[in-house]
Image (cartoon, helix red, strand yellow):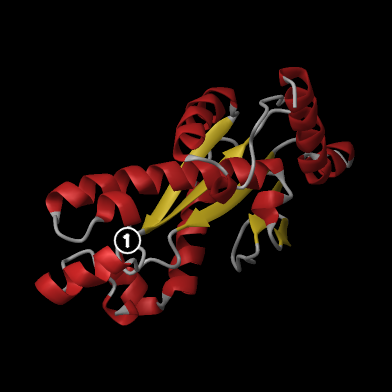
Amino acid sequence: MTKEERVEKQRQRLEEMLRFERKLWEAGKLHIAGVDEVGRGPLAGPVVTAAVMLPRDFSLLGVDDSKKLSPKKRELLFDQIMEAAVCVSFGRREPQRIDEINILEATKEAMLEAVSGLSVKPDHVLIDAVRLPGLDAPQSSIIHGDALSVSIAAASILAKVTRDREMERMAVVYPGYAFESNKGYGTKAHYEGLARLGPCPIHRRTFL
């Protein structure tokens, strides 16, 4: 595939992923936020959420579900999304809160925190797979939204890079669990570290 063909394919992909946003813009909704989370499955570390509002002329190519992108590509897109966005906000809940109220409720709290932190109030919120009771704006829950909506995909990239950076810092604070490579997920090296050292302060006790 030539470079021109790759660029054209990315343009087509962007057009596909803008369909939810375009429908809302055409209905008069000016400020649309996408929301996603990262970190529901790991044994350690926080759940991190991001809310992002993109401009109507958003044209950044390559934005997609963060799980489909390489770490290098996510890092590059992180900076580009932060520069292009109308506004961005993050939320998080720590392992202790996850143990206290369960991961789904902690995720919802962190998503609400991210939306409430936006400097521009959204007219509509697009959320990956979750509905948020108490959200002070119309919302749409989209299954596999990070692969279908560019706003949710952008939020997934911002949340993923933010959480990965956090877990790389935690690998220095709590060595022996290979957090720098597994980011808290249950890999063989992580389980070996748990067997040798026991849990550390950022482990989710209800997940072990």
Position of residue 104 in the picture relative to residue 154 (left or right): left
Indicate whether 78 appears above or below 20: above
| Res 138 quadrant in image | bottom right
Amino acid type, label 1:
Gly
Query: Which x, y percent locates residue 192?
Result: 20, 70
- The quadrant the N terminus occupies is top right
Q: Position of residue 46 (x, y in %)?
A: 34, 59
Residue 146 or residue 1, whichever sits in front: 1
Task: Give the residue drawn at x 36%, y 71%.
Answer: 98
148 left or right, relative to 52: right
**Residue 57 visible at all:** no
Closest to the observer: 186 or 17?
A: 186
In the rendered view, tell whether residue 58 sits above or below residue 46. Answer: above
The answer to which of 208 and 192 lies nearer the viewer is 192
Is residue 93 visible in the rendered image? The answer is yes
State the residue lying farthest toward the left: 197
Residue found 30% across the figure and 68% down from its top: 188
Residue at the limit of the structure toward the front, as seen here: 1
Label 1, on which residue? Answer: 184
From the image, which quarter does the C terminus lie in?
Answer: bottom left
Q: Secondary structure at mark 1?
A: loop
Tell me: 23 left or right of 134: right
- The residue under the point 39% across, 77% down is 101
